[in-house]
């Protein structure tokens, strides 16, 4: 496995519809030292979802990668597999992972000092509207909304920093501050 030693590993988690993807895009645009490890998924691409949002693969391809030890973390969620391949970031880059809380738990076991950030919506109604507007069907919206409370509770139990995305720029700045603090801590270590 590629060594993550000496790098900040930043995990951005949160339920569907809270704006994680938008925040991650802005973090990457503003910080050239961040490198996103693109997740794989077996779910179909949503309407209007960029092709580069995930590596979309079939279940057999995903399972073959599991068998080869090709994932840093992986989970089954809503009947689909999703996971993060073993990262191979460029020299000097810190690693950004946009993964669910269960995946965050797996990574935390390997990287105990990873920065954990849980993005939440300002309200459940706001989250529901975002899910509907991105094209999720009613059954998927209901399942995602049902899962939200348990995801948040697990994040709190794991010590995630909670960032409410009531304004994207404010949420991005809050996460940038957490990253800066972690980088400073790493620089001051012998």
Image: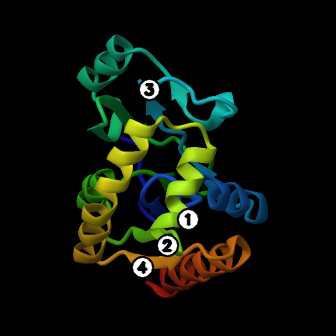
Tag 4 or tag 1, which sits nearer the N-term? 1
Under tag 2, what secondary structure? Answer: loop
Give the image location of residue 163, x and y in percent: 51, 77
Location of mark 2 (residue): 123
- Are there few (<14), some (14-19), or many (20+) residues within 10 Å of tag 1? few
For the residues labelled 1 and 2, the Cα–Cα distance comes to: 5 Å
Location of mark 1 (residue): 126
Location of mark 4 (residue): 161
- Are there few (<14), some (14-19), or many (20+) residues within 10 Å of tag 2? few
Which of discs 3 and 1 lies nearer the camera? The answer is: 1
Location of mark 3 (residue): 43
- Are there few (<14), some (14-19), or many (20+) residues within 10 Å of tag 3? some
Closer to us: 70 or 58? 58
Give the image location of residue 71, x and y in percent: 34, 35
Q: Are marks 1 and 2 in contact (CB under 8 Å)?
A: yes
Tag 2 or tag 4, which sits nearer the N-term? 2
């Amino acid at each position: 496995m590629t060594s993550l030693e000496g790098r900040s590993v930043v995990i951005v988690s949160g339920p569907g519809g809270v704006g994680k993807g938008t925040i991650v895009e802005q973090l990457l645009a503003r910080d050239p030292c961040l490198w996103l490890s693109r997740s794989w998924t077996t779910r179909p691409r949503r309407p209007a979802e960029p092709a580069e949002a995930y590596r979309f693969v079939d279940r057999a391809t995903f399972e073959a990668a599991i068998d080869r030890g090709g994932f840093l973390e992986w989970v089954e969620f809503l009947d689909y597999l999703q996971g993060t391949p073993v990262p191979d970031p460029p020299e000097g880059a810190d690693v950004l992972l946009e993964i669910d809380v269960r995946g965050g738990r797996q990574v935390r076991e390997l990287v105990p000092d990873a920065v954990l950030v849980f993005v939440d919506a300002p309200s459940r109604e706001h989250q529901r509207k975002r899910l509907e507007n991105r094209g999720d069907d009613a059954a998927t919206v209901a399942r995602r909304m049902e899962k939200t409370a348990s995801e948040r509770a697990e994040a709190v139990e794991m010590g995630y920093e909670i960032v409410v995305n009531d304004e994207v720029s404010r949420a991005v700045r809050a996460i940038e501050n957490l990253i800066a603090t972690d980088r400073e801590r790493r620089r001051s270590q012998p």
